Image (tube, coloured by chain):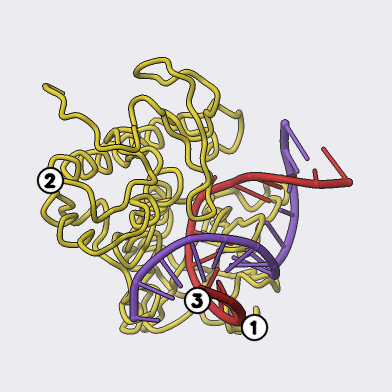
Chain colours: A yellow, B red, C purple
Amino acid sequence: MPELPEVEHAARMLRRWLVGRRITRVEADPTRVLRGIEPEDFARALGNRTLESVVRRGKNLLLAFDRDVGLSSHLGMTGRWVRRRAEDPARAHSRVRLHLPGGDVVHYVDQRMFGGLELTTRSDLPRLPAVTTLGPDALEDEIDAAFLARTFARRNSAVKVVLMDQTVLAGLGNIQATEALFRARIHPSRRASELDRRELGAVARGIQKALEHTLGMIDTEELAYLSDGAVIENPFLVYGRAGEPCPRCATPLETLRIGGRASALCPRCQPLTRSAPRRGR
DNA sequence: ACGGATGTTCGCGC
DNA sequence: CGCGCGAACATCCG
């Protein structure tokens, strides 16, 4: 579930729910989600703290509390922040609960527990290795053909692998990289260094479109895997749609494994040889 | 029952 | 050092 759009959504929700409100009590279950700290110490450190700001960097959330307490949150594969009422029944896979005045409880929920919560100081938040190694943010920073040309030069790996490299560009995962390349009409196995200027421009626009589209879906709560209740169908153009007709040309979509990950593509819209320039949009 | 799932990291071999 | 591959982490779903 969490790539840049979902993490951005989580940042907005955490601001709405928590900024300016004192955490009255913390319950932290003993799981690998808590990195390098015992549950009791974690709970004690966040108890009575008030959240002052939330910043997203790539797929990382950086929370700054009063008294120089910092918390970094990475959602891994199945992590999410949700708000419940104290009287609600237990939430499956809830790992940490932040109790607020008035009965609201903010849960960190993570089925597979690949995500993590790391406690630090505010000043160290931007110095965490997970943050200092990141490339520019795919949403906040201007990602254009010139940037991609600089970054892709001498990168001979598949363009999809490079797009998912967080040290190159922060925020894209398997879904967004797949969607961005479909929008750009670029085959995911093309070598990053061989793309020409026109193709790089298409990739840059594809990234922005894919991210904005998913963010828009989340805002209208159409994203199935984010909503807690009813499951809504796959909201993506090609991800998870192998065998279905291409939404642009109706050719059956295919799937490959690139860098160990499934990659959906349209063999007609995304040819392996350099695509012919096309007119208009 | 087996294989795969939105992420990241580590070890190994070339 | 660059690059590719497989495994590991933990759990659920089809």
Relative placement, left or right, of A13 versus A30 is left
Tell me the quarter of the image containing the C terminus of chain A: top left
Q: Quadrant of residue A65?
A: bottom left
| Residue corresponding to mark 1 | A38
Look at the picture and state if A38 lies above or below A108. Answer: below
Q: Nearer the viewer, mark 1 or mark 2?
A: 2
Q: Secondary structure at mark 3?
A: strand
Q: Nearer the viewer, mark 2 or mark 3?
A: 2
Q: Chain of mark 1?
A: A
Residue lying at 43% horizontally and 53% vertically, measured from the top left: A17
Instruction: Give me the disc on residue A118.
Output: 3
Q: Secondary structure at mark 1?
A: loop
Instruction: Give me the disc on residue A124.
Output: none
Residue A16 visible at all: no
Q: Are marks 2 and 3 on the same chain?
A: yes
Q: CA distance from mark 1 to mark 2?
A: 51 Å
Instruction: Give me the disc on residue A197.
Output: 2
- The x and y percentages for residue A55 are 31, 63
Please name the amino acid that badge 3 sits on: Glu
Earlier residue among tags 1 and 2: 1
